[in-house]
Structures are given as C-alpha cells and as structure tokens.
Image (tube, rainbow, N blue to C red):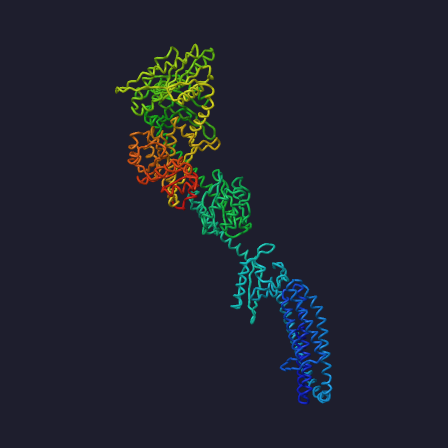
C-alpha cells in the first residue's frame, strides 16, 4: 500500500505541475515579465527543495552509517552534500533550470546574504567530514544534526527573501490570475475527477494483487519441508519451512546470506552449479545429503527459474526414510544373494580352503561388500583372503594388519575371548585418534565393518570380516541373514571335519593292516577261547606254517617250541593279575636254530569293557643280544688304543672318589692334550695320526703304577687317575715324568720322525667335590689354562680358574643348546653399489637368538665353537638357511643379487666345505651364482699350497668367491692373481681410520687400485659416515656396506624395504 501511496503522490505532483505550467503559459501570453518572475520563484523553490532533500539524505546516511548499516557510509553522505553544494552555488549565481526552464537572475541582496550563510554551513560540514577521514572519529551523525539546523535556517531565509521579491510580481498577476481562475478551476476539477477514478481502479488492482500474494504465501507455507527463493549469486531472498528443524539455521538468519556462508565449500559449489543449470535450462533436480543436529538427512530438490529474472525457486523435501528403505531393500537382496551363493559354496567345496575362498568371493561379488576375509586364532592370523574387489590390496592389507594386531581392535576382542552369544557385530567406522585400525579403514575408504563369528573349528576361533565402502547399520533381519550364513558355514565345517576324521580313520586302519602284514615281528590275534584268529606273514614264517594251518589252533603252540617250559605258567599268572605280560624266551625255529624271542601278550578290551581277544607279539632279538655282547666291550674301551673310554673312566672315577673320600686318602687326576696333533694328523694323514696316538698310549701306559688308570677321552686327550698318593708333590713329579716320556721322537711307518708335546692339567682329589663329572670339568679348565700358556706346559687347578671357566662352559652349553634347538637366526646387511646407490647384494650375518639370556655377539661365540669343534654344525646351518632364504626371495620375484656367507679358518682347514655347499645348493634349488663365499685372508694363508686348489673346487660349483678382511694378512700377490676370486673386502679397521690415519687411506687406495688392475671388485665394509663413502666413491671403490646405508635386517624387513626399489 505504501508503494501505491507514493505513486498517488507522484501523480498528484505531476498534475499540479501541469496546472502550474498551463497557468504560466497563459501568464506568458499575458505578461512576459510577470511570467519570468514567477519562473524564477519556481526554480529557486526547486533548488531549495533539492538542497533540503540532499541535506536530509546526508543526515539519513550518516544516521545509518553510525548505526552499522553496511549499505550506507561516508561516501553516500559526501555524495548528498556535493549535490546540495552544487545547487547552493547555482542559487548564489542566479542560475537554474527546472523541467527545461532555465533562468539567469542574480538574487536580491536579502537572498544573497541567506545564500552565503547556506554555503558557509555546507562548507563547514564538508570540512568536518574531511577531518573525520583523518582522525577516524565516528561523529558524523552529531555533526549533520547540528549543521542541519543552520542549513534549514539559511534555506528559510532564502525562501522568505525570494517570496518577498515575488510579492510584487504576484500583485501584477492578480488581475490576470483572476481571469484565469475560472479556467483553472474548471480544468482542475475535471483533472481531479479523472485522478479519483484512476486511484479507485489502482486500489482495486492492488487489493487483488495482495490477495493473490497472500494465497501464494499460504500455498508455499503448505508445501512439505522447505522452499526457497535464491538469486543467481546464491543468496537466499525468501525462506519457507513447514519443518524448521530441517534448516541449518532459523529462517530469519538464512535470508540474505549466500550458499557459501551456510554450507561446506564442496556442497556450496554443487548447489551453485544447480542454480546456474536451472537459470540456463529452466528446471533442475538433485539429491544431496545434509548433516543436521540429529544426524545426516537426505533431501531431494526441484528447482525452477522465475521467468524474466535471475531468481530460482528451490523446493526440497526430506527423503531420508525413502532412501534408507531402498538401501535396506537392496542390502537385503544382496544378503539373500550372498546366502544363496554361500549355500552353493557349501555344496561344492571340497575342503576348508576352497570353502573360505568361495565365501569371501561371494561376499564381495554378490553381497556387495568392498572386501572380505576370514581371521582365526590362536594365534591371530589370516585364514584366507583378503578378497579385495576393486580396492587396492596394499590398503586392505594394512587394514588387516591393524585389525589383527592393533590396540582396541574389535576383531581381537572376538578372537581372544570365548565366542559371544551374538554372532554378528556391525558398526560404522570413522577415524579416531589413537585407533590405528580405524585410521587404516578410513585411508582405504572403508566406512562399514561387520564381524561374523563362525564358531570354533579344530581348536581355532573363526571370524568372517566384511568391509563396506559406505557406512551402514544392520537391522535384525539383516543380522539374522548373516547369522544364518554363519550357521551354515559352521555346519559345513563340522561335516568336513567329520568326513576328514572318517577318511583319516579309514586310512589309519588301512595303514595298520598294511603294517601288520609288513611287520617283521610275529603277531597273533587270539580269541577268548585261546585259539588263533589271525596271524601275519612273519608269524607264519617263524612257526613254519601257512596261515590256514594256524587259524583255529590253540595259542599254546608257542610253548611247544620254547626251551623254557615255565614261561607259559609265568605268562598266565601275569595275565590273570595284570592283564599283560612281556618276557624273553629261547625258542627253536622250524629250521632247528635257536633264537631269542621277546614275547608280549595283552588283552584287547572292547567298548563294553569286556575281554574279546588277546594280541600276542613276538620279536626275534637274537642279533640284538649278540650285538649287545659286542657293544659291551666297545662301549667301555677305546678301539684304537685299547684304553678305557670316557664312560668307563667316569664309572671308575665315581668309585675311586667315593673310596678316597671315605678313607681320607690323597689322589690326583691328570688330563693331557697333544699340542701339535692336528698339524701332524693333517699333514701326514689320518693313518699316521692313529699311529702316533697308539705310540703315545704305550708310552703313557708304561708310567702307570698298580691301581692307576689311564683312559683316552677321544681325539688326542688322555686322563690319568692316580690313587693313594703320599703327597701332592708326588703328582707333580708324575707330570714331569709324563713330559719326559714324550720327548723322544716317534718314528712313523714310512720312517718319518715326529715330536709329540703336550699340555697338561692337574687336580688333586682333596680339591675336588665328590663328582666325577665336576672333576673332569675342572681338569679341562686347568688344561685350557695350560694351552693358553703356550702349550708344552702344565697347570694345577686352582679355584681362581673357576669363574672364567664357568662363564666359558656356560657359553659352550648355550651354544650346544642353540645348535640342538636351532636358536640361531640370520640377518642380512645390504651391499650397495657406490656408483648408483642401489642394492648390489646381501651378506648373511648369524646371530644367537636366545632373547631370555644375555646377548652374545659373533666375536664371542664363534671362537668357542671353533675350539669345541662345533663350528661346522653352525656353518652347515648357515649355508643351508641362506640358500633356502635366497630361493624364497627368488620365488617371491625379488632380485636381491647374491648372498654372501662367511667361512671361518677352522671350517676351511678341518671340514669338507665343498661338499656342504653342494648339498645346500641341491637341497634349496638356489642358482650357484646367487651364492658368494667369503674366506678371510688369514684362513686362506693357512691352506698353504692347497689354497688355490681349494678355491678352484669351490669355484667349480659355480659360486662366487671373495677374500674377506683383505689387507690384514700377508698373502702373495702372485697367488692372488691366480686365485679365482671375484671380490676383495677391505677390512673395517682401515675404513674406520680413514679420516685420522693417512696410512690407512693410502692402503685403501692401494687395494682399490689393485682390484682395478686385477679386474676384481672391491668392497669396503664398516662404512658409517658420508665422509668415508665420498672418499671411497672418489677413489673408484665399487661396493660398500655399513650402518650408513642400512643395519642388518630380518628377511621380512629387508623384503619390505627393498623389494620394488630396484637393485
């Protein structure tokens, strides 16, 4: 209605203006001068009105600016004042125009003074605004209010002066005006009558339009959910909401705001595209999610462009329930399909592995899941899968690792505890700090997780793990379908287990029947009446009868061939009292020969605990008894020297110690080890070594007193036990006699002479505890100390030797246990090409794997293994394990180069290394060129003239050869030229001193240059700094290894770090 009123006032003003112009036209015709005066009056009044309007606008804008209205500001205030100033200046000059009427008449003196006051007030206000720009003080509203009064007073004075000036002109016009009154009255009446009709028509149209708008507002308010009017810039012009709870903010807070102010950037961008598409095409449609206070809702929107404008009507309604219902129907369909596929899998699967694979594939392909796999425990592991569908296997593998081993994993909760009553556990997955499994799921785009318990199978709990790419909540029906799948799988597993047990039972029965037929022991099955039910071929052969002849015969037929008639009576008595009997019987075979039989008889009780039959088993142990007699001699005496062996010595020692301790007598024990026996044995041959041992045994035996004992423990070790000594000095004199007996040379069969010298350890009985084993260990300690003293000497055991010996013995025991239990492990350190920085090979490094015991390094346990003669066992294991691991890497598709293993000098000199390497290569299937053998320079020198042939034997296998710790020995360069080696390894001691020792740097340069000249690759070990690496690279060194590049790694860690990274 306000707009209508404004139009009416405008129309009235135009009507009056038309009358005035008409009157002025008539006055011009009658009196040109009076008309000009009247024009001046009108122009000045218009200018005054314009000035007043502009100053009022300036005051209005100042009020709004001070009130914080963003649509107003000082710029609008200045614009309004400029317009007022322009009109004031024109008024002062007497110039002006109105509706095409221009005047130029200087104002009268009274008017000029008023106009000057007006200009002064306007100028003061502009100066105040300029000062506001400099100081920033918000005083515009107060300034305009104060100045407005001065301006209004000056305008009033100008009006008064103008009116006074015009009074004279009006007097002149009165006569003319009187003549025109009738004409103007008639015209004005007609004009007013016409305007009244127009106003009535306008009121009627406005009322109709407002009624239509009210109806439209009521219609919009009745539309379900939400409707908006949005312009092309995404600004909300109108908002209607039948459900205000579906708005992000109250409607009043939404109007006037743009899309990007209310929604996330991505969603706001999508909405703007819909608005633009609607404006270009006329209509649009979309479906979008929106997060509200009570959760996520899904809306469907329809948009229509408003014709002839840049506005869009947006109507949207909540379709969450409809979408959820559609999703639920689709999910139920997929689950029913999965159930059907699983039932088919149960029918066609032959074993658990095939069943698990079919189930996981059905979950992904039919059930619509993003990934599926089956976990089991204990221990927690992947039973099958994961079946990944379109997802990356690496991402799903990370999820699997975290669910199996991560903290607070819901899967581990199910696997580590008894199966819960609820089979299906479903949840939405969102990343949360501290939950690695949830973070891994989020990174893989997996937002839904279902865990389906499959019960226990052969002692292992099984859980089917299902991942979804969208979040979901399973209702009771969906959970029931998954529970039905779980029940079917569990039933199928039971059937498979029963079928496998039945097949195994049948197989065992067949094997047992075959075993009975194949057994060399005689077996008779006897019924409750004592008659033979069955007999195996061995029983028939021993008794000299066919099976048909034995069936139905009384079991007493064995008594007919036994030499001892009482055994049957003893057997029956034992069966009556104990239910079983075993014993040896001397019996005569059908051939007439006497044999010793071991007979066992036992009752066979059926499930009803009633005796149904008996089983009689007899074994021919004739040869065993004959062997026992021969072994009795072998077990206690040394075959080479005829002396008592370790076992007999221990028995005698226990008896002697017990007797001496009881009688309080003094005794002593002496342990002897030949110092140079190994060299004589290796250089002259085993036969000559045996001859030397026999000669030594004869000489030592000649020193024995009555009652003393001399035993050979094995190898070149002998022990004297001296009884009833008068003094300790007597034992020491005996030691000197032993040394004297060994001084004369020993003549070998070929006429060669060798000299035998020995190290000896001595202990008296009063120093020992009452234990033969402990006494021998202390003797070994004393002997070890004598050898440490350089050999050809003797040491008496003192308690101070105990701690060191104890530690060494503990280490030896640990090593023996480690060899038996395979408590060693191999780590692999990368060998790096210095030119390219890529992996060039690996070195296998052995470590003692006994985490519950103190750590022991290779530098500690390798010498002990060499001393006790066990280094070859460790070498056998290291060689085979390295070859097997290399084969596994090759099968996995990783080209690691070659694996280098170390050979100790003791292995090279004492054991058949070539045979060991050949066995390992054949057993593992590793190509020979993938294996590299590292032999120390010192160990190679100890081979002497055999070094070259030894290396060529190994090279003939196709393996690579390297000289380790090169530069620490004195190998011949001429020999090096002939050796079939492919690599020289610079000892780490030279690398460590590169920065501080010029001689080390020079030696390294020389070795690198030597390798280049001989076309042998050079590798530097122990590289730990970039400075060392740069030095070696600049000198042309080919390869390097050390902690600068990487530490020794486990096979899994090595494969994870380097596979795919190139060599």
- Please count the marks in the image: 0
Above or below, comparing residue 972 to residue 387 in the picture:
above
Residue 810 quadrant: top left
> Residue 455: percent from the left, percent from the top?
50, 41
Foreground residue, 762 or 1014? 1014
Residue 252 in picture, x, y percent from top left: 64, 62
* Extreme residue in the left direction: 750
Q: Nearer the viewer, residue 854 or 520?
A: 854
Residue 936 appears in the figure? yes
Asked whether 5 or 137 is in front, the reply is 137
Left of 512 or right of it: where is 691?
left
Give the image quarter of residue 530: top left
Q: Is residue 605 left or right of residue 318?
A: left
Counting from the top left corner in percent of width and height, residue 865 is at 40, 28
> Which quarter of the picture shows residue 1043?
top left
Q: Where residue 659 sits: x, y (%)?
A: 45, 12
Q: Quadrant of the C terminus?
A: top left
Q: Which of 625 and 550 is in front in this view?
A: 625
- Is residue 560 among what the camera can see? no
Q: In which quarter of the image is the N terminus?
A: bottom right
């Amino acid at each position: 209605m306000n707009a209508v009123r404004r139009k009416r006032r405008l129309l009235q003003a135009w009507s009056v203006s038309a009358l005035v112009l008409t009157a002025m036209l008539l006055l011009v015709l009658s009196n040109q001068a009076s008309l000009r005066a009247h024009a001046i009056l009108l122009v000045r009044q218009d200018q005054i009105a314009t000035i007043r309007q502009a100053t009022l606008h300036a005051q209005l804008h100042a009020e709004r600016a001070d009130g914080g209205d963003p649509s107003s500001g000082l710029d609008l205030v200045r614009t309004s004042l400029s317009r007022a100033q322009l009109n004031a200046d024109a008024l002062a000059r007497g110039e002006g125009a109105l509706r095409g009427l221009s005047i130029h008449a200087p104002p009268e003196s009274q008017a000029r003074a008023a106009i000057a006051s007006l200009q002064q007030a306007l100028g003061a206000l502009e100066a105040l605004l300029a000062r506001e720009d400099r100081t920033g003080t918000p005083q515009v509203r107060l300034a305009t209010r104060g100045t407005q009064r001065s301006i209004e007073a000056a305008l009033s004075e100008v009006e008064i002066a103008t009116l006074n000036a015009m009074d004279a002109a009006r007097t002149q016009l009165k006569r003319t005006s009187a003549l025109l009154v009738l004409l103007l009255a008639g015209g004005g009446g007609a004009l007013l009558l016409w305007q009244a009709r127009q106003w009535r028509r306008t009121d009627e149209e406005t009322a109709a339009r407002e009624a239509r708008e009210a109806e439209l507002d009521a219609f919009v308010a009745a539309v379900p959910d939400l409707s908006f009017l949005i312009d092309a810039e995404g600004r909300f012009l109108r908002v209607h909401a039948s459900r205000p709870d579906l708005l992000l903010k109250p409607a009043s807070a939404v109007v006037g705001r743009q899309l990007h102010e209310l929604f996330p950037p991505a969603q706001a961008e999508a909405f703007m595209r819909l608005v633009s598409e609607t404006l270009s095409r006329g209509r649009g449609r979309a479906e979008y999610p929106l997060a509200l206070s009570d959760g996520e809702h899904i809306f469907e929107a329809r948009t229509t462009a408003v014709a002839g404008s840049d506005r869009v009507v947006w109507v949207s309604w909540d379709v969450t329930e409809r979408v959820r219902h559609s999703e639920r129907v689709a999910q139920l369909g997929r689950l029913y399909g999965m159930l059907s596929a699983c039932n088919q899998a149960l029918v066609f699967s032959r074993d658990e592995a095939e069943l698990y694979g079919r189930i996981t594939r059905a979950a992904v392909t039919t059930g619509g899941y993003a990934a599926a796999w089956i976990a089991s425990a204990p221990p927690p592991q992947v039973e099958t899968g994961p079946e990944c569908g379109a997802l990356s296997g690496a991402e799903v593998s990370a999820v699997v690792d975290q669910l199996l081993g991560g903290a607070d994993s819901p899967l581990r909760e199910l696997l580590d505890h008894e199966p819960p009553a609820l089979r299906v556990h479903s949840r939405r997955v969102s990343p949360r700090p501290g939950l690695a499994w949830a973070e891994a799921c989020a990174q893989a785009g997996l937002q839904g997780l279902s865990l389906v318990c499959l019960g226990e199978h052969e002692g292992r709990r099984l859980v089917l793990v299902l991942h979804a790419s969208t979040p979901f909540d399973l209702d009771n029906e969906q959970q029931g379908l998954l529970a039905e799948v779980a029940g079917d799988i569990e039933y199928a597993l039971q059937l498979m287990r029963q079928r496998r047990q039945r097949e195994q039972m049948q197989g065992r029965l067949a094997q047992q029947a075959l075993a009975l037929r194949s057994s060399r022991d005689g077996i008779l099955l006897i019924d409750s009446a004592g008659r033979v039910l069955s007999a195996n071929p061995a029983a028939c052969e021993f008794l000299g009868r066919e099976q048909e002849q034995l069936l139905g015969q009384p079991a007493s037929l064995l008594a007919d061939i036994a030499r001892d008639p009482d055994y049957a009576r003893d057997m029956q008595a034992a069966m009556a009292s104990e239910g079983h009997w075993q014993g040896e019987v001397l019996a005569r075979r059908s051939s007439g020969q006497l044999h010793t039989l071991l007979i066992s008889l036992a009752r066979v009780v059926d499930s009803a605990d009633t005796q149904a039959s008996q089983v009689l088993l007899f074994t021919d142990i004739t040869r065993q008894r004959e062997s026992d007699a021969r072994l009795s001699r072998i077990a206690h005496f040394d075959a080479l020297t005829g002396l008592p062996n370790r076992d007999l010595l221990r028995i005698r020692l226990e008896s002697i110690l017990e007797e001496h301790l009881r009688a309080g007598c003094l005794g002593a024990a002496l342990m002897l080890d030949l110092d140079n026996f190994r060299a004589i044995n290796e250089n002259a041959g085993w036969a000559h070594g045996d001859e030397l041992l026999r000669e030594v045994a004869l000489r030592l035996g000649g020193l024995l007193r009555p009652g003393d004992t001399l035993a050979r423990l094995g190898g070149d070790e002998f022990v004297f036990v001296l009884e009833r000594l008068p003094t300790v000095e007597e034992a020491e004199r005996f030691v000197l006699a032993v040394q004297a007996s060994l001084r004369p040379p020993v003549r070998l069969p070929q006429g060669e002479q060798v000299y035998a010298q020995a190290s000896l350890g001595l202990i008296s009985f009063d120093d020992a505890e009452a234990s033969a084993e402990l006494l021998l260990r202390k003797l070994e300690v004393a002997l070890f100390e004598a050898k440490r003293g350089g050999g050809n000497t003797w040491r008496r055991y003192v308690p101070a030797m105990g701690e060191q010996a104890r530690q060494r013995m503990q280490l030896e025991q640990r090593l023996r246990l480690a060899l038996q239990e395979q408590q060693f492990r191999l780590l692999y350190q990368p060998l790096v090409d210095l030119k390219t920085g890529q992996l060039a090979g690996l070195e296998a490094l052995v470590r003692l794997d006994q985490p519950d015991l103190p750590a022991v390094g290779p530098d500690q346990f390798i010498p002990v293994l060499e001393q006790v003669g066990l280094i070859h066992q460790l070498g056998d294991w290291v060689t085979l394990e390295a070859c097997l691991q290399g084969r596994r890497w090759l099968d996995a598709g990783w080209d690691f180069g070659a694996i280098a293993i170390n050979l100790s000098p003791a292995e090279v000199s004492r054991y058949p290394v070539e045979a060991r390497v050949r066995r390992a290569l054949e057993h593992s299937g590793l190509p020979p060129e993938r294996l590299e053998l590292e032999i120390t320079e010192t160990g190679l020198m100890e081979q002497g003239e055999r070094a070259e042939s030894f290396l060529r034997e190994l090279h003939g296998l196709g393996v690579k050869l390297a000289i380790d710790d090169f530069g620490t020995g004195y190998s011949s360069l001429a020999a090096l030229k002939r050796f079939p080696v492919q690599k020289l390894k610079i000892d780490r001691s030279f690398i460590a001193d590169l920065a501080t020792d010029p001689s080390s740097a020079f030696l390294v340069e020389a070795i690198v240059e030597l390798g280049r000249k001989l076309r042998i690759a050079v590798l530097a070990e122990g590289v730990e700094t970039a400075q060392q690496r740069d030095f070696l690279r600049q000198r042309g060194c080919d390869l390097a290894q050390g902690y600068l590049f990487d530490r020794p790694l486990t096979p899994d860690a090595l494969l994870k770090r380097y596979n795919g990274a190139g060599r």
